[in-house]
Structures are given as structure tokens and as C-alpha cells.
Image (cartoon, rainbow, N blue to C red):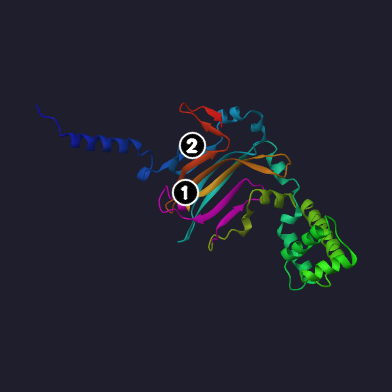
């Protein structure tokens, strides 16, 4: 009785293993897959990504602050030789939409509107200088004035030494405060849909151009779904051309959100999406799959 050569047996075993791992669909592409922040998922036509109950149990009361609990990702058919796209469907926790739509309570100095108006103000009060340079001279005035704004000849001497002759400090400060109050009012009175899209880091879906797509995230006004345009991956695990999905929670002020977990994914031109890695901040799994706080 003769036996096959060992190399032939190894080849046969490898072939059977690959066949068993191929899954449904053509070329090993399964129709859909689930992902619960362990390992990888895909390539698949669609993937359901969900914060597992075991992790929420480990998080305790913090789990009640979760705003996004699941995201479904699926390739979007895009007629472009440069870009690919995915469609995202979000599952929000109860009250999350209301929280994300509430007035933004943020420092107006971090907004584009404030920056643009401040630059216009600087051009009017200090021609030839930037807003940053004006802030520097104001800081110098306070410092050289012993922690308070100097006045009279003392102020003029300091201004002249820094090349800011005839700079109307009081007028500038008064106008700057008016701009802060004006921008703050604009923020608080913004359309809830604008607040929602701003917190989700998205543009309105109406700006998405199928025929001439540009990279970005485009979302429905109710945030129920979004389309993300990004470079196509060269292979399923192409880290250089991967995207990120974020799961987040409310943190302190309702206007603030804090990342809880991130998922890295790729999308290929043939419609394959793959989860290539994930991270849960502050938690990790042991070898038995239990979620432990770091």
C-alpha cells in the first residue's frame, strides 16, 4: 500500500482550508458580515458594526452616554476612476439626535466666521498687520504694563516700540468683543440640522455630485444615512487608503462629543468593504473575549 507524498498532502490540506474559508458569493465575497470590535471582517458587500452588549456592560453608566451604537457600511457604486464611496447607516441611541441638534455651545473664537471677521477688523484698525501680530502686541501691553492694560504715554511708548503707532487699542477691543457676541448669537440660533451635520463632520447630501465626486462626507439632514467619498483601496488591507468610522458619546456639555471607538475600513472598486482594525478607548479584550478596563 502506498501513501501520498507529504508535500501533496500539505497542498491538499491548504486547498481544502481555502475552500472552507471562501464564504458565500463569487471570489470569496460574502453578502454581508457582522463586526463587534474583535479581529477583522470582510471582504463583504456590507458589514454591520455594533458596540457589543458585553462592552456596554463593562462601561457601566458611561454606556448610557453613547450616541451612536451601530453603523452599517456598504459600498456605493460610483462612476469614477479615481474615487470610491461607501454608504453609511447610523443607529443612534434614544435622544441622541436631539442632543446632536442642540445649539452649539462652543467658544466662537474657534469658528471660521469669527476668524474672518477678526481679520477684517485687523485690516481696519492695524493695516499691514495680521490678527496674530495684533494679539502679540496686546499681550505685550499687558505684560509690560504689569498685568494690566497701560494707558496714556506709557501705552504709546510700548506701541511705538513694537511698530504699532496710532493703534486704537480701546476701539479694537470694543469691536472685538462685539464680534464675539455676534458670532455667539449666530451659533446659538443656527438651524438644528446645521448643528447636527456640524457635529457629524458632514456636508449636506445635496452637495454630493455623483458625476463629479469630491472627497468628503455627505449626510441626510436627519443624519439617518451618509455617503463618504474617498480614494479606492488597492487591496482589502490597504492601510494607506483606509478610512475611519467613529463611535462617540456625550461628554459633559451636550455640545461636546468624545470618541469611544474607531474602526478602520477599506473600500475597493469591485464593491468590497473590509474592516481591517479597530480600537476601543480605555478597554481591551482578554484571550477569552472578556472586555476589561485598561
- The answer to which of marks 2 and 1 sits earlier in the sequence is 2
Quarter occupied by residue 210 = bottom right
Q: What residue would you read off at disc 2?
A: 34
From what the image shows, is residue 20 above or below residue 187? above
> Residue at image x 38%, y 42%?
25
- Are the residues tagged 2 and 1 within 8 Å (C-beta)? no
Q: Quadrant of residue 89?
A: top right
x%, y% of residue 269?
A: 43, 54
SS state under label 2: strand
Closer mark to the observer between disc 2 and disc 1:
1
Above or below, 109 against 245 in this view is below
The percent position of residue 55, horizontal first and vertical second, equals 57, 30
Question: Which residue lies at the image location 59% right of the left edge and 28% below the top edge?
Answer: 58
**Which residue is the site of mark 1?**
266
Q: Magenta segment: does it hold 91?
A: no
107 sits to left or right of 1:
right
Left or right: where 86 falls relative to 270: right
Q: Percent from the top left, x then y, of residue 171?
A: 86, 65
Q: How many marks?
A: 2
Task: Find residue 10 and name its label.
Answer: none
Categorize mark 2 by other alpha carbons within 10 Å: few (<14), some (14-19), many (20+).
Answer: some
Location of residue 207 in the rendering, given as x and y in whole percent from the top left corner: 62, 59
Q: In this picture, which residue range is highlighted in magenta?
A: 213-240
Query: Would residue 171 be visible to someone looking at this image?
Result: no
Which quadrant would the C terminus be assigned to in this image?
A: top right
The structure residue drawn at horizontal position 63% and vertical position 28%, both measured from the top left corner, is 60
In the image, is residue 243 above or below residue 93?
below
Mark 1 element type: strand
Residue furthest left in the image: 1
| Marks 2 and 1, how far apart at CA | 15 Å
In magenta segment, residue 232: yes
Amino acid at each position: 500500500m502506498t501513501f501520498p507524498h507529504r508535500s501533496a498532502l500539505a497542498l491538499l490540506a491548504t486547498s481544502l482550508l481555502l475552500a472552507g474559508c471562501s464564504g458565500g458569493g463569487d471570489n470569496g465575497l460574502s453578502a454581508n458580515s457582522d463586526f463587534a470590535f474583535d479581529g477583522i471582517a470582510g471582504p463583504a458587500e456590507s458589514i454591520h458594526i455594533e458596540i457589543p452588549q458585553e462592552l456596554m456592560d463593562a462601561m457601566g453608566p458611561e454606556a448610557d452616554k453613547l450616541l451612536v451604537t451601530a453603523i452599517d457600511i456598504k459600498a456605493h457604486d460610483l462612476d469614477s476612476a479615481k474615487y470610491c464611496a461607501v454608504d453609511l447607516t447610523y443607529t443612534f441611541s434614544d435622544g441622541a439626535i436631539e442632543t446632536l441638534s442642540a445649539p452649539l455651545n462652543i467658544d466662537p473664537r474657534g469658528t471660521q466666521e469669527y476668524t474672518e471677521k477678526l481679520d477684517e477688523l485687523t485690516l481696519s484698525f492695524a493695516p499691514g498687520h495680521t490678527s496674530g501680530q495684533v494679539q502679540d502686541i496686546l499681550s505685550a501691553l499687558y505684560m509690560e504694563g504689569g498685568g494690566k492694560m497701560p494707558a496714556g504715554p506709557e501705552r504709546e511708548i510700548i506701541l511705538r516700540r513694537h511698530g504699532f503707532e496710532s493703534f486704537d487699542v480701546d476701539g479694537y477691543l470694543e469691536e472685538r468683543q462685539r464680534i464675539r457676541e455676534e458670532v455667539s448669537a449666530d451659533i446659538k440660533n443656527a438651524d438644528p440640522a446645521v448643528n447636527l451635520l456640524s457635529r457629524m463632520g458632514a456636508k449636506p447630501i445635496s452637495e454630493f455630485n455623483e458625476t463629479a465626486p469630491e472627497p468628503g462626507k455627505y449626510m441626510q439632514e436627519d443624519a439617518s444615512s451618509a455617503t463618504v467619498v474617498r480614494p479606492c483601496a488597492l487591496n482589502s488591507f490597504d492601510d494607506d487608503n483606509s478610512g475611519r468610522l467613529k463611535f462617540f458619546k456625550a461628554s459633559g456639555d451636550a455640545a461636546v462629543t468624545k470618541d469611544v471607538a474607531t474602526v478602520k475600513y477599506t473600500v475597493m472598486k469591485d464593491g468590497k468593504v473590509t474592516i481591517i482594525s479597530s480600537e476601543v478607548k480605555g478597554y481591551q479584550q482578554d484571550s477569552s473575549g472578556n472586555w476589561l478596563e485598561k
